[in-house]
Image (cartoon, rainbow, N blue to C red):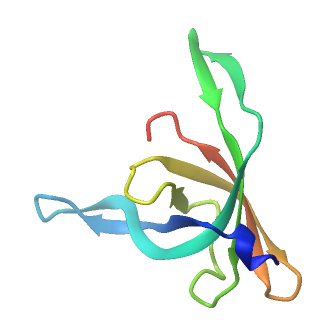
């Protein structure tokens, strides 16, 4: 893997129970890790959904392998750029080589 290509910071968000502003436990996403990544957008598509245009932004995100991120899965999310609130749903996670990295296929959320 080319370390120079990993020039973007992404936040990995773990699905689970979080505490809201009122102290109640609700389903949500908590920070798992902030890592260096290669982010490569693919051409987007538009489709008609419920009489609305729904745009998708497919993106391939590559990160280094570590024990902390080894169990990243489609229930989790990615925030990119970090702190922007822009989130991506993870569609698949594939290990690169023998624990060299993870290649993540993700779709940008319209509400993020």
Q: Residue furthest left?
A: 22
Residue plotted at (54% across, 59% down) = 78
- Residue at the extreme top: 51
Q: Is residue 35 above or below residue 79?
A: below
Q: Is residue 76 left or right of residue 38?
A: left
Q: Where does residue 50 sit, x and y in percent of width and height?
A: 57, 14
Residue at 57% over, 8% down: 51
In percent of width and height, residue 26 lies at 29, 60
Number of on-image labels: 0
Name above or below for residue 58 compared with residue 67.
above
Q: Is residue 101 above or below residue 22?
A: below
The spot of residue 87 in percent (x, y) is 49, 49
Task: Please tell me which residue is depicted at 77% across the width and 34% down the height of the picture.
Answer: 43
In this picture, residue 101 sits left or right of residue 15: right
Q: Classify residue 67 by image quadrant.
A: bottom right
Q: Quadrant of residue 99?
A: bottom right
> Looking at this rendering, what residue extends furthest in the right direction?
97
- Image quarter (top left, top right, bottom left or bottom right) of the N terminus: bottom right
From the top left corner, tell me how far across and down residue 89 is, in percent. 59, 51
Left or right, 23 with reference to 99 = left
Q: Residue at x 60, y 80 (%)?
A: 69
Q: Which quadrant of the figure contains the C terminus?
A: top left
């Amino acid at each position: 893997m080319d370390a120079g290509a990993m020039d973007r910071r992404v936040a990995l968000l773990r699905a689970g129970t979080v505490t809201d502003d009122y102290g109640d436990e609700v389903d949500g996403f908590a920070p798992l890790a902030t890592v260096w990544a290669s982010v490569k957008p693919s051409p987007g598509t538009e489709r008609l959904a419920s009489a609305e245009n729904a745009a998708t932004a497919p993106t391939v995100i590559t990160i280094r392998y570590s024990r902390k991120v080894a169990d990243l899965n489609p229930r989790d999310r990615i925030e990119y750029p970090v702190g922007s609130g822009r989130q991506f749903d993870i569609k698949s996670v594939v290990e690169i080589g023998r624990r060299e990295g993870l290649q993540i296929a993700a779709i940008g959320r319209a509400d993020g």
